[in-house]
Image (spheres, coloured by chain):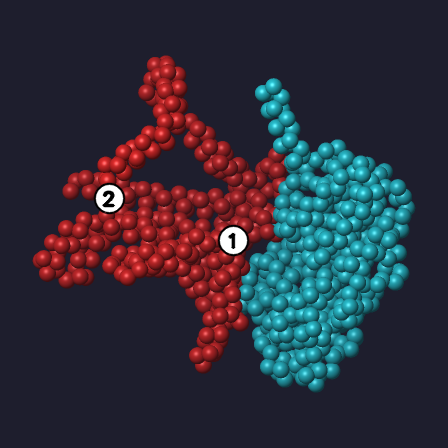
Amino acid sequence: MADVRNGIATRAGAIILAPVGWLANVFDAPLRMLQRRTGSNGMAVFFLAPNMLVFGIFVLFPLVINILYSMTGGGALFLGDRTFVGADQYGRLFSCGSYLDPKSCTEDLFWIAVWNTLAFVVLQVAMMVAVALVTALVLNRELRARSFWRAVFFFPVLLSPVVVGLIWRWILQRQGLLNLMVFEAGGTPVNWLVERNWAFAATIMVSVWAHVGFYALILLAGLQAIPKDLYEAAEMDGTRPMRVFWRITLPLLAPNLLVVLVLTLIRAVQIFDEVYVLTGGGPGTSTLFLTQYIYEVGFASMLRNPGLASAASILMGAVLVVLTLIQLSIARRNEQRGKMR
Amino acid sequence: MRMNSIILGLSAGLLSSTAFAGDVRVMWYSDGVEGEVIQDLLNRFMKDNPDINVILDNVAYKVVQEQLPVELEAGRGPDIARVTNIKELADHWLDLTPVVADPAYWQTNFGDQFDWMRPDGSKIIPGFMTQITLTGGFVNKTLFEQAGVPIPADTATWDEWVDAAGKVQQSQQLNAAFAIDRSGHRISAANISYGANYIGADRLPAPIDAGTKAFAEKLVNWVADGRMNKEIWVSASGTTYRAGADDFINGQIAYYYSGSWQVANLASKIGKNFDWVATGSPCGTAACTGMPGGAALVAVKYTKNAAEVGKVMDFLGREDIMREFTERTLFLPAHKGVFAGKIDYKTDDENVKASLEAFLKASGKIAPNAAALPAWKWGTPVYGALVTRISQVMAGELKLDEAFVRIDEDIKAQVAEASK
């Protein structure tokens, strides 16, 4: 029976792959000729060129344009019509009595956004990694209906950030679901989205809720890649569960944790959509983050200032580049350490 | 044969996406039913003018606000557009003088608002206002009656209105007494009622004055004492717009300050739940004014079909067509002849009829400082700075004096940037 199934699968595979083989034959001769002319390096360039072209058009070119915009001023929209102002926009962003006191800065809203983003990154990343880890550990156990629970945690990841923002706005607003429950339980309803600390906490909680499934999945994959015999050996040695976690699970999960940490960090710095829908940056400016500041300055206000918005986005991009380089450096060091072992 | 098929295929593709000579493309956004009304009117036009194909692109308001300016800067865009940021984009409008049948008719009936739409000093005919809007208050009559509080008179001040709404709040145990939309345009009506003037002698923004400061202080105090709904202004940052209509519709506030464009929205959502009516604008120490504004239908100067655009605009600007548009959409008319004549709004809702009457009456009390603002190009940065900074005061992030300094700095910076 198994032989029959294998035979069918082989035949089906051959039918599906037949066009690929045919295409390979068609391109074989010209590619060989190209290789003879350009050598192996030339072939590498040939195969990388389409990707580099797309990267150039959609990443490098806009980046260069953005840098140029950041050195211009004026009300015109098109680069050619704008006035060159050099580093004035950066000067405006950095014009401060004290960077710790946004009120002393010319662009006070920029620095409010910077400090808010920093606080958000620290708290949200810590919470995201912790919750993702706990979720992955739980989902890795022999649970009843494990696939169902995995789907439940992953489902919010599939939702549009706008939907996430709206759902939670309806829950957290003054007459929302949460206050109804608080009221029914005999408590005093709280204006969750109007009180500064609660609103800030809500942005963290909602972003964790929306994305934790994705990061938990990465960690779950890491957990499942840990050889079972290590746990069996630890069990035979009578090692306590916490010690197993610290000595086996965590070290072997470190590469995945690092990926989660860096991805969470980058995403936290870029936070915008769900928070914009949920709080609009309020109350006051307590949940005004960098991306919203850039959006408002560059697009939302009627008198747009693309120069200032571009300068702020370049600074934010620089922070992200630094974070990515740190991640690459740590990843490389871990890799080398692994090889030495 | 194969080549012919390819050409045919390509042609079919192009046909579906490209406007022909003779096509007139209209970019339109809707707040209520006006999209359906205008389509109906345009269908009638096309029946009488089979050689002109008018394509109505119904888009979201955000598209008009954020994408249309980019298209116009690139020298493209629709042939006709319905816009509210009329003055800021004034350089892109077509002069209809050579393409409309009777420029004098346009001048007579729409001329009062031409300066709202064209660059300073220009004499072009850029289009017409599809409707005039006017800011004003709405009162929940049922809540006032239940509380036994008399509705303030036409000449009542902001303080008297808030006091009366506050009594209703206490009696009916409401979360707040009243709300004002989170918009610099809305509070400007009140600022001007307290004597504010935004326009300096050089036509640039003047430093904010005692009138603006007086009302801003009141507003902050009303939030602090719980009479004004804190959520509307405090729960967002920057220039984000928030309307208080939902709280009024749900019967959670006794008084709501917004504008005439809300009439159709309130009518459809409140239905028979309670009685309500528009009340014009409360008084300050200097006036009892609302802020005029509205949406305009303008022709874009990059059109390749100016003659056809002229015919469409002539049709839509006709007195009988404007009257029908006004009556079906429940808007305030911009057409002088329609305004002067009898308007038979197509609704059975007495609240709506009374409200529109109130707005028509209030439109005769617009203060000169308010009337000047739609034709002034720096209104937007002033409105934006007011909202951003006053909200910060309400949230406890700034003191009022600090906010006033910031408002002036913000406006100055934006003017300097735009003037580079």
Q: Residues within 10 Å of mark 1 (few under 14, many from 20)?
A: many
Q: Position of residue A75 (x, y in %)?
A: 64, 44
What residue occupies the far left of the structure in this picture? A237
Circle 2 residue: A334
Between the residue at mark 1 and the residue at mark 2, the CA separation in whole angstroms equals 36 Å
Which chain is home to disc 1?
A
Front-most of residues A121 and A18: A18
Chain B hue?
cyan
Residue positioned 60% across, 72% down in the render: B229
Q: Is residue B333 above or below residue B28?
A: below
Task: Name the mark on residue A292.
Answer: 1
Q: Quadrant of residue B242 in the image?
A: bottom right
Q: Position of residue B106 (x, y in %)?
A: 86, 48
Mark 2 closeness class: few <14, some 14–19, many ≥20 residues within 10 Å:
some
A63 is higher (above) or lower (below) than B199: above
Q: Nearer the viewer, residue B385 or B89?
A: B89
Q: Earlier in the sequence, mark 1 or mark 2?
A: 1
Looking at the rendering, in which quadrant would you find the C terminus of chain B? top right
Q: Secondary structure at mark 2?
A: helix
Task: Tell me: residue B148, above or below residue A291.
Answer: below
Amino acid type for the residue under numbered disc 1: Gln
Q: Between residues B78 and B12, which one lies in front from this camera angle?
A: B12
Colour chosen for chain A: red
Q: Is residue B110 left or right of residue A33?
A: right
Q: How many labels were placed on the picture?
A: 2
Q: Amino acid at mark 2?
A: Asn
